Structures are given as structure tokens and as C-alpha cells.
Amino acid sequence: MTEIKCEDESLCMVMEDVDEEEMPVTEIYDNASNVTVIEKLSEDERLLEFNVDKVNYRIDLATIDWFRLVPTQSHMATYFRNNNSYRCEWDERGEVIGNKFDNQELLEGDM
């Protein structure tokens, strides 16, 4: 088991599924605690386990494209919370480092 620190952070996930507009499905869990990756070697299974408001969640990592813990006030957390669908890139703290629209990079002032 690997526990991941997440004080005042949000757990943002991009799922393997896409929506009707062919955009990746996103999920956000604010104030997640006890975030842990569990590997069950006997079953060849990897799970992401965490708690939110005393509710325990277990999600199969095979259904998640990627996940990241970011500050609750970061751009990424806001993007996920608002269910935005423009394409952009973030640093490890969830701040925008690039924004792409129709495969053209926009200047930071255009975001």
C-alpha cells in the first residue's frame, strides 16, 4: 500500500471513458483523505482507495487514465469542479502550463 498526502487538496481523475462529445470523463473529490494505491498481487488488481466525508471509495485503477492530488484552489481543481472541456496542460500542482484549442497553443492572456 502507498498512501498519498492530501491536506487541503482535491483528488482529480480522468477516467478511461469519454462523454458524448468525445471528451474524457472527469471526476473530482474535494477533501479526500487516506488516499492509497492498493495492489492485490494474487488477483492482479490495483485499486485507488480514499475517504471523503466518512465515505470510503475504492476505484479500479484500470478505469482511471490518470489522477492527481492538487490544491483545492488550483486551476485543475476549478477546471474539474466546473466540468470544463477545453484542452490544457498542468504542472504537478495543478496550475496551467499550456492551453490548446484546435491544436494551436494560446497565449496565457487568451485563457
Image (cartoon, rainbow, N blue to C red):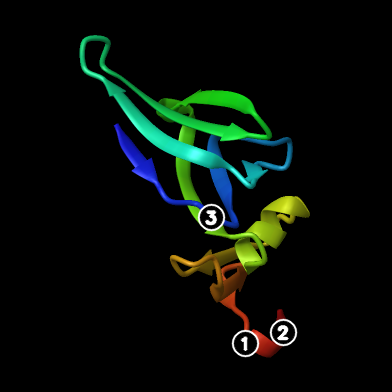
Q: Is mark 1 on a helix, strand or loop?
A: loop
Q: Residue furthest right?
A: 82
Query: How crowded is the residue under tag 3: few (<14 C-alpha within 10 Å), some, or many (20+)?
Result: some
Per the image, the residue denoted by label 3 is 7
**Nearest to viewer (mark 2 / mark 3):** 3
Give the residue drawn at x 65%, y 44%. 28
Q: Position of residue 67 (x, y in %)?
A: 48, 46
The residues bearing labels 2 and 3 have C-alpha atoms spaced at a distance of 32 Å
Mark sitting earlier along the chain (2/3):
3
Label 3 sits on a secondary structure element that is loop
Residue found 52% across the figure and 67% down from its top: 89
Q: Is residue 88 left or right of residue 109?
A: left
Q: Is residue 51 left or right of residue 48?
A: right
Q: Residue at position x 21%, y 10% from top?
A: 42
- Provide the secondary structure element on which disc 2 rests: helix
Give the mark count: 3
The residue that disc 2 covers is: 110
Q: How far apart are marks 1 and 2 (CA)?
A: 5 Å
Q: Indicate whether 74 appears above or below 84.
A: below
Residue 68 position, x and y percent, is 48, 51
Say left or right for 82 vs 96: right
Indicate which label's residue lies in the foreground, 3 or 1. Answer: 3
- Tell me where residue 88 sits by quadrant: bottom right
Amino acid type of the residue tagged 2 in the rendering: Asp
Contact flag, marks 1 and 2 (Cβ < 8 Å): yes
Rounded to the nearest angstrom, the CA distance separating label 3 from label 1 is 32 Å
Image quadrant where residue 41 sits: top left
Residue density around tag 1, few if under 14, some if 14–19, many if 20 or more, within 10 Å: few
Give 6 or 83, whichever is nearer the viewer. Answer: 6
